[in-house]
Structure formats: structure tokens, C-alpha cells
Image: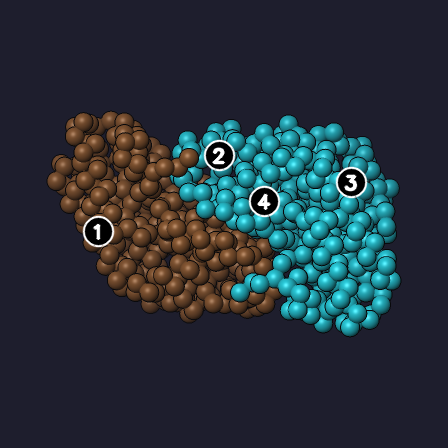
Chain colours: A cyan, B brown
Amino acid sequence: MIDYKLHIPGPVNIAPETYQSMSTPVMGHRSQDFVALYQSCQPNLQKLFQTEDPVFLSTSSAWGAMEGSVRNLTNKKVLCCMCGAFSDKWLDVSRRCGKSAEGLQVEWGKNIDPDDLRKQLSSGEFDVVTLVHNETACGMMNPLQEIMQVLNEFPDVISVVDTVSSFSAVPIPKDEWGIDVILTGSQKALAMPPGLALLTVSERAFRRAEEVEGRGYYFDFLEFRKNHEKGMTPSTPVIPLIHALKHTLEKIFEEGVEARHTRHAELNQMVHAWVAEKGFELLPEKQFASKSLTCVKNNLEIDVAGFVNALREEKKLSIDGGYGKIKGKTFRISNMGDETAETIAHLLAQMDEVLARFV
Amino acid sequence: MIDYKLHIPGPVNIAPETYQSMSTPVMGHRSQDFVALYQSCQPNLQKLFQTEDPVFLSTSSAWGAMEGSVRNLTNKKVLCCMCGAFSDKWLDVSRRCGKSAEGLQVEWGKNIDPDDLRKQLSSGEFDVVTLVHNETACGMMNPLQEIMQVLNEFPDVISVVDTVSSFSAVPIPKDEWGIDVILTGSQKALAMPPGLALLTVSERAFRRAEEVEGRGYYFDFLEFRKNHEKGMTPSTPVIPLIHALKHTLEKIFEEGVEARHTRHAELNQMVHAWVAEKGFELLPEKQFASKSLTCVKNNLEIDVAGFVNALREEKKLSIDGGYGKIKGKTFRISNMGDETAETIAHLLAQMDEVLARFV
């Protein structure tokens, strides 16, 4: 029985109305009723992705779309920008797909440097770059605009940007910045349950896919496009989450996208202020700190697991005790989804109370 | 607004309690609470699949697992048994994965003949066979036991059986019959919403996967197994559907699996009796007619689309007007899920009333 509230960096806390929306009856996915549902989401999705490219619904976690991107786009070699657990893994996944792949690695918590990227791409051997915008494991947000400026110097290189934990929390103007593929998941800043990935693909990327063999079917970009034109998905989709998506999009535009971004920035600042007040530090440099979650360096050397457990057991609030090799050396607090100044203030006050026993 | 009840061959009608179960709060998928949920499903899943092999939860439609099976298991060549829309497509999908593949094709509505299969396999060029047990498009159920007897004569050939629209409706003793991989989807006889595929993999198939390159990550059988041992999935799973699965499994064992099979057989007979009484015929031969749905040949040459629309508009009951190249030449009625003698009798009575205007 889950009797605690999620403040981990995904899945995040889900509103009762979102759960409720998933009980809207399902229909045949080749029926006009499904087409109406699919098409009703599209204008809002394009607005939110700031793109005129189609936005596809993939019944999978984001990893499916991440693997799919590599399979669809790589003829020569992928360059994987590596700065944390998820971006590091993308290199391994690319190779498992039988693709030639190399990493541009920085220390966890550090950002990808646009000049380093330019140097790597100058060799001319790469035709795809993968980038995790917001490294959830490190709470680090890459300087996407500057990185895209470099990528746009290389017209034969397709950019694939994972925005899993930044999408809808900060502005990412896809078309303006010239991003080819953006992908994200449902369970982060969109505050929906997991199980649905969203991805949007540029004309340039479709042209590349047309030249690539072995794309398969389930994540084939061209199959997505063909079905999209009919208001459908290539395979049976996770319809309850599409109902939830429709509801979520309406809610986002009710609040207003700019207001949403401002809210996330303010909540994030509240957490940062708490971190500084307690004498903790952020893992990344301040200017590259994520705006959707906070990765706190455990410089006070507290018992992180004990702290996180006590907070969950006693206060019914769940934060994260660090991911992968920085487990225990960091802890993470999400301000994604529907959080407000009140709910974050409550969280921080409860953390204060519990922390007193651990410092 | 969906104001009609689904009697199409998937998704089928979903009980309010199943929708309700999806509102159980989600948790972090690396938490002990998730492990408890995952592991609570496993014994019932193994019982239902009649296997000691692990049963994996794939956040995808069944097509993902179908594509994944080919990518995981094929080193030499796949033989795709083709007898309808879905099994035919498996050949195409296999080739799109860059695999060498060939078809054993029969006319839609006809069954796969075990002797023909033996002849094909005797060439020694194949190391995987794909079979759709119950061709949903044709309402035809292959003689699986006889086919498995042939497959067991070829110990180097891995069998992959799609039971999307037969699983839990008829007995399929996996271990006893020696099936390597069984896969199914959530939205057919299990009567859950779409978005979750289930698959179970034999030791032999794992050993094969260990020798195959390019399996990727998202559908990698060895990743599934590695995570399964910890009570987890390789990627973030569609947690609401796992809550629904837990609920559904409990409901199935409350009814009793044998009682469930008997119920489906009886309901199917009711539909068959209606078909005969009206002067229609079944598409497949009687002995190979599916027990989970009925594919009716339109030998009376009615306006199928008009009939199906009228039934939905006037009676709020949705049956299917035929799939792919046999659209209009057939129509299909599902008896999967939670249907009872009362609900099927109601459906048939309403069909009677509407049909009178179309014959």
C-alpha cells in the first residue's frame, strides 16, 4: 500500500483527476472514436513541443524511443554525449543495436561543453548525436541552446534530444533551435503515470530514416508517420494514458505554459535556498543546475538512506537517495508536475524536522 | 464519447473494477513497493501460462514482443507460419529487422498444417518458427498441440507462439507442449486496457539469445531476465496496467481457470448456434474455429458496414466489420473477457433485431 507522496524525480505525484481520466472507456484503436482522441491531442502537443513536426505517441518507456532513434537514424556512427547514468547508458544501448558508437564523456554532474562537441564532430565520422538535456541522475541541465548552435554547423548530423525530465518544465523551442528529434516520457514533468513516450521527428530525420536498414517495425519513424496521417498509431496504443494525456494537455494550457515554466523555476529556487541554508551543495555547477529537480551533494555526510526512509515512514514523503554510483553521495528532490509553493514549503519543513536527527 | 459496449475482438469490454484498480497510486519502479507488486503477480502468471519459466511484463503492444522475439532468437532464418493479417505481417516485420525470413503461407481462414511445417523445417535452414495460435483476423485457431509435436522433432528450432487472442480463453500448457516463447497482450481475453504485453521464455530460448547479436535493449530477453531476478523490469513499466494485472489475475483464479475455459467454450457455442440459425457460415473450418471469437463469412451478402453501424448506433453494441482484405466479406464477434450467457444472449437478440433489416 502506497501511503506516501512522491517527490522523487519520476514517477511524480499524480492528481486524482488524472487517474480518473484513465477510466474513460477504451475504444477500438482503428475506430473513428480513436482517431478523434488522437487528433484532439495533436495541436496541443505541437504547441507544447514548439514544433510543426508531428508528435508521435509510443507505447513504451522513453528507452524504447531512445533505442528506436538510434536504429532509425544511424548509418555511420552515433556520438553519445555522456554526463550521467542515462546518457552513459545510451552508448551501451546503441552498441547493442549493432550500431557503431562512441562517447563524449564528462564527469557526472558536469555539463557537455559545446566546444568539445564541435571538436568531436569535426572528424566527420558521426551522423547522429544523442544528448540527454536534463540528466535526471545528476540534476544537471545541459546548455541546450548553445549545443544546438554547434549541431547546426553540421547539417549531416541528426540531433536526438532526450527531454524526459525537462519537457514542459522549461522552454525548449524545437523548431527555433533546430532540434531533429525530441523525446520524453509521461511520468516526469507531465505528471502522468509511466507507460507512454512522446516523440517528434523533423523532415530531415525522416529523410535519414528512409536510408537506414533494420529500423524494425515497433519504433519505425516512417510507420509512425504513415499511421499519424490517419490519426492512428502503428500498434495498439496504451489508450488509458492517451485519455490522461488529453486531460493533462488541457490542464497545462489552462495554467498557461509560461506560467508553468515560472512556477517550476520558483519551486526549484525554494529547494535551492533550502540546500544552501542547510549547508549542503548542489552536485552540478549552479548555472547548470536542473530546474525540474535538485541533486544535492551529501557534503555533510549524513546517512542518506536513513534520512530518506525516515522521511517516508514518518512524514509520508518520498524523496530519492541517489542513483547508481552516486547513491548515498547525493539525494534528489523533484519539483516537477503539479507542485505548488505550499506543497514544496510543506516538504521542506518536514525535511527540516527529520534532518535535525541526521546532522 | 464512447457510449457503446465493445464486442470486437479486442480491446474488449473492461469491468469498472479493472478501471478502478488502475487508480492505485504508482510508485518508483526501483522501490521495494514495486518489487512487491511485481512478485505478487508472478506465481499466478506462471500458473496461468502453465510454466516454470519466468513471465515478463513488456510495456508495449504484443507487436513489440513479436519483433523482439525475432531480434532475440534468429541467427539463421525465421519461418513465419502465415494464415491471416497478423501472422502474414510477422514475415514483413522480421525482414524489417534485417533478418532472413520465409513464409509458410495458407489461405486466410485455413489452418497451418503440421505436415507442411515438418516438410519446411526438414531443410534445416530455419532456427526460429513464428506462429499465431489464434488468427484474430480470421477467427481461426491453429492445432497448436499437433504443431508443437512437429516442432519438438527439431531441437534447434525455437518456437514463438503469439496467443494474443487465445491466452486465458483456452488451455495452452506451455511446458507440457514444449513451447519456447509465448506472448500475449492485455486487451484481449484478459479484458484489460491495451498497453501491456506478457511473454514467457524457455531456457533454450535464453541460450539462443546469448548467441544473437543486435538484440538491442528494450526487448532484450536477457535484460528482462536479469531484472526479473530482482523483481523489476528493464525500463520504467506501465504501472497502472500492472495494478490492473494483479487484480485481473486474482479475479481469474477466483472464477477458476477451468471454469473460465468452459465459460468461453459455451459462449462461443452460443454465437456459433446463432450463425447457423441465420444461415451464415464460419470463415474457418468448424474444427479450427476460434473459441474466443467468431469470424462469420458474409455468405448472405449483407451490407456489413451498415449492419455494424446500426448495431452500434441503435443498440450501443460494437462488433467488428472484418479486418484487412476480408473487411465487409466477414464480420467478427468476440466472446472474450467477462462475458456471460446473459450478455451474449442480449447481444445476439439485439443483432437479430437489427439484422432483420439487412437480409
Q: Residue B182: horizontal and vertical position, in percent?
A: 41, 57
Given contact means CB atoms under 8 Å apart, are the residues at marks 2 and 1 in contact? no
Q: Nearer the viewer, residue B356 or B123?
A: B356
Taking B322 as reference, is A251 left or right?
A: right
* Quadrant in the rendering for residue A143: top right
Q: CA distance from mark 3 to mark 2?
A: 32 Å
Q: Residues within 10 Å of mark 1 (few under 14, many from 20)?
A: some
Q: CA distance from mark 1 to mark 4?
A: 40 Å
Q: Residue B194: horizontal and vertical position, in percent?
A: 44, 47
Q: Is residue B165 visible?
A: yes
SS type, badge 3: helix
- The residue depicted at 73 percent of the width and 49 percent of the height is A341
Q: Which mark is residue A197?
A: 4
Q: Earlier in the sequence, mark 4 or mark 2?
A: 2
Q: Is residue B60 above or below residue A204?
A: below
Q: CA distance from mark 3 to mark 4?
A: 21 Å
Residue type, mark 4 in image? Ala
Q: CA distance from mark 4 to mark 2?
A: 17 Å
Q: CA distance from mark 2 to mark 1?
A: 33 Å
Q: Which residue is mark 2?
A: A37
Taking A204 as reference, is B96 left or right?
A: left
For the residues tagged 4 and 2, is the chain the same? Answer: yes
Q: Residues within 10 Å of mark 2 (few under 14, many from 20)?
A: many
SS type, badge 2: helix
Q: Which residue is mark 1?
A: B341
